[in-house]
Image (cartoon, helix red, strand yellow):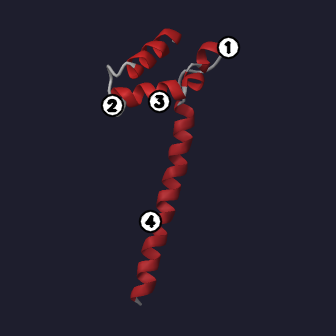
Amino acid sequence: MEEIKELGSQHLENNTIEENSGLGKAIKYFNKHYYELTSFCRLEGAKLDNNAMEAQLKLTVRSVKKTLCFTRHYRVAASVT
Protein backbone atom coordinates (compact mmCIF):
# COMPACT_ATOMS: atom_id res chain seq x y z
CA MET A 1 0.00 0.00 0.00
CA GLU A 2 2.87 2.31 0.79
CA GLU A 3 4.36 1.67 -2.66
CA ILE A 4 1.07 2.61 -4.32
CA LYS A 5 0.96 5.83 -2.33
CA GLU A 6 4.54 6.73 -3.28
CA LEU A 7 3.97 5.90 -6.96
CA GLY A 8 0.91 8.13 -7.11
CA SER A 9 2.73 10.96 -5.36
CA GLN A 10 5.64 10.67 -7.81
CA HIS A 11 3.30 10.88 -10.79
CA LEU A 12 1.68 14.00 -9.40
CA GLU A 13 5.03 15.63 -8.61
CA ASN A 14 6.48 14.81 -12.05
CA ASN A 15 3.31 16.08 -13.77
CA THR A 16 2.89 12.79 -15.64
CA ILE A 17 -0.71 12.83 -14.37
CA GLU A 18 -2.81 15.99 -14.43
CA GLU A 19 -3.92 16.95 -10.90
CA ASN A 20 -7.44 17.89 -12.00
CA SER A 21 -8.05 14.72 -14.02
CA GLY A 22 -10.10 11.89 -12.58
CA LEU A 23 -7.00 9.84 -11.81
CA GLY A 24 -5.22 12.84 -10.29
CA LYS A 25 -8.17 13.55 -8.02
CA ALA A 26 -8.33 9.88 -7.01
CA ILE A 27 -4.63 9.86 -6.14
CA LYS A 28 -4.97 13.05 -4.09
CA TYR A 29 -7.97 11.56 -2.27
CA PHE A 30 -6.05 8.34 -1.59
CA ASN A 31 -3.06 10.25 -0.24
CA LYS A 32 -5.22 12.51 1.91
CA HIS A 33 -7.23 9.64 3.43
CA TYR A 34 -4.47 7.02 3.40
CA TYR A 35 -4.57 6.29 7.14
CA GLU A 36 -8.34 5.74 7.19
CA LEU A 37 -8.40 3.73 3.96
CA THR A 38 -5.70 1.36 5.17
CA SER A 39 -6.96 0.89 8.72
CA PHE A 40 -8.20 -2.62 7.88
CA CYS A 41 -4.52 -3.59 7.48
CA ARG A 42 -3.66 -2.42 11.01
CA LEU A 43 -6.77 -3.22 13.03
CA GLU A 44 -7.38 -6.85 13.84
CA GLY A 45 -10.95 -7.90 13.09
CA ALA A 46 -11.80 -4.76 11.13
CA LYS A 47 -14.68 -5.33 8.73
CA LEU A 48 -14.10 -4.72 5.05
CA ASP A 49 -17.69 -3.83 4.25
CA ASN A 50 -20.15 -1.37 5.71
CA ASN A 51 -23.39 -2.74 4.31
CA ALA A 52 -25.14 -2.74 7.69
CA MET A 53 -24.25 0.90 8.29
CA GLU A 54 -25.34 1.91 4.79
CA ALA A 55 -28.69 0.20 5.31
CA GLN A 56 -29.27 2.18 8.51
CA LEU A 57 -28.28 5.44 6.83
CA LYS A 58 -30.60 4.70 3.93
CA LEU A 59 -33.57 4.46 6.32
CA THR A 60 -32.63 7.77 7.93
CA VAL A 61 -32.22 9.53 4.59
CA ARG A 62 -35.55 8.20 3.38
CA SER A 63 -37.25 9.49 6.51
CA VAL A 64 -35.72 12.94 6.10
CA LYS A 65 -36.71 13.10 2.42
CA LYS A 66 -40.31 12.13 3.25
CA THR A 67 -40.46 14.79 5.95
CA LEU A 68 -39.14 17.47 3.61
CA CYS A 69 -41.56 16.45 0.87
CA PHE A 70 -44.52 16.50 3.27
CA THR A 71 -43.48 19.89 4.66
CA ARG A 72 -43.13 21.34 1.17
CA HIS A 73 -46.59 20.08 0.11
CA TYR A 74 -48.14 21.32 3.35
CA ARG A 75 -46.71 24.82 2.83
CA VAL A 76 -47.99 24.95 -0.76
CA ALA A 77 -51.47 23.81 0.30
CA ALA A 78 -51.54 26.35 3.15
CA SER A 79 -50.49 29.22 0.89
CA VAL A 80 -53.14 28.39 -1.73
CA THR A 81 -56.05 28.59 0.71
Distance Cα–Cα, label 2 vs label 1: 33 Å
| Alpha-carbon span between mark 3 and mark 4 | 34 Å
Q: CA distance from mark 1 to mark 4?
A: 43 Å
Separation (CA) of disc 2 from disc 4 = 35 Å
Seen at 34% across and 34% down, the residue is: 20
| Farthest bottom residue in view | 81
Q: How much space separates mark 3 and mark 2, taking CA atoms? A: 11 Å
The kind of secondary structure element at disc 1 is loop
Say which amino acid is labelled 3.
Answer: Tyr
Q: Residue furthest top?
A: 3
| Image location of residue 72, percent across then percent down | 44, 71
Q: Amino acid at mark 1?
A: Glu
Asked if the residue under mark 4 is in contact with the one under mark 2, i.e. CB atoms within 8 Å, the reply is no
Relative to 55, say whether 41 is above or below: above
Which quadrant is the C terminus positioned in? Answer: bottom left
Task: Give the Cα distance between marks 1 and 3.
Answer: 24 Å
Q: Which residue position is annotated with label 3?
A: 29
The residue that label 1 is drawn on is 44
Q: Residue at x 49, y 71 (%)?
A: 71
The x, y position of residue 59, in whole percent, is: 53, 47
Image coords of residue 29 (percent x, y): 47, 30
Between circles 2 and 1, the one closer to the viewer is 2
Callout 4: few (<14), some (14-19), or many (20+) C-alpha neighbours within 10 Å? few
Q: Indicate the secondary structure of the residue bearing disc 3.
A: helix
Q: Which residue is mark 4?
A: 69
Mark closer to the chain start, 1 or 3: 3
What residue is at 60 percent from the left and 13 percent from the top? 41
Q: Is residue 69 above or below residue 7?
A: below
